[in-house]
Image (spheres, rainbow, N blue to C red):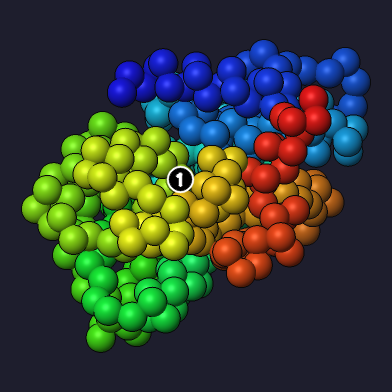
Amino acid sequence: MNTTRRQFTIGALMAAAVGTTPMLVQAQSGKTIAVLFDGLYSEFWVAGMQIIKDEMKKRGYAVLEGISDKDDSKQFEQVRAMIARKVDGIIIVQTDSKAVIPAIRAANRANIPMVHFNRPPAESDAYSVAVVADNQTIAREAVLHSCRTAKQAGGKFKAAILIGNLGDPNAIQRRDGFQEAVSQFSDTIEVVARIPTEWNSDKAFAGLTNALQANPDINFLFTSSDFLIPQITQALKSANKWAPIGDPKHVIFTGFDGFPTAYELMEQKYMDACGVQNLFFETKLAIDAIIQMQEGKKPEKVLLDPGFAITQANMMEKREEMWGYTLLKQKKSG
């Protein structure tokens, strides 16, 4: 898949759902926060950017946006530009946890609060705050639901996991959460395929296709991110294994992130469970941390979003907390 085209397609979809704004926007009055992302390459990041901007607007803040396209040097220059503009705070999503440290130091020297959204920096003596999801627990709880589903169905299950980029702590934690869950059901579930994706959709599709050819009895699947759902759907359809719950060909399917597509698949009974990051809560944590630092306080360096698992059992109860469901609802009502 062409990455640029995917970014544009997702951006267009989200613009229809929530109304994105140009890449550089500043209101005429009030305090200003810089929001610097390394890319808008999935619905999660597009939604995160929009939710942050919406919440900033409600609180009376102007927003300056910057996208670095996974270029650490470019992002550092953006940080320096925002410091020169004397912004009141910076919310950042970096590509490399170590490369961002000079940016943190520069913000420290300028006495400008910095919050990392969803990705923590590497350990250092520089001070900033990271708002992160409890990826390992969320993944474990979602996969545990699917494991119990498999146990109740009876028989043996062959499992596959699509692993994210292992340079990303989020990917490692999600992999570990999956392993913690399935290890409790070793009498029922055998992991036969661990598929590296490096957060690349083409690599994910090729890897899952090969795994399904080598292990045609795979009937339990976990993806470390919902952005790979289109490739998973295509691979399962090609293997004649795309079927809803209740069909003998159904593959027990667990997602992670809480995309709109994930909710639709749960509603249509193709997905059994999904680990959800609470973007609304993470946004509140990030902005509250900025305000506290502006007031001279020093929040903990890591603030945790516990997230939750949405399942076929609790879907109606929990869906209002799922950012993907909220966007779907907005799109339908708009």
Q: Nearer the viewer, residue 243 or 279?
A: 243
Of the residues shown, which amino acid type is indicated by label 1? Asp
What is the count of numbered marks? 1
Would you say 74 lies left or right of 189 here? Answer: right
In the picture as drawn, the residue positioned furthest to the front comes out as: 247
The percent position of residue 54, horizontal first and vertical second, equals: 79, 33
Instruction: Answer above or below: position of 270 versus 188.
Output: above
Q: Is residue 282 visible?
A: no
* Vertical side of 26 occupied by 165: above or below: below
**Identity of the residue furthest to the left in this view:** 214
* Residue plotted at (59% across, 50% down): 267
Location of mark 1 (residue): 226
Measured as percent of width and height from the top left, residue 97 is found at 41, 46
Query: Is 12 or 284 nearer to us in this picture?
Result: 12
Residue 43 occupies quadrant: top right
Report the side of 90 relative to 104 (left or right).
Answer: right
Q: Secondary structure at mark 1?
A: helix
Question: Image point 17% across, 65% down: which residue?
Answer: 192
From the top left corner, tell me how far across and down residue 26 is, in percent: 77, 18
Tell me the residue at 67%/13% (across/down). 22
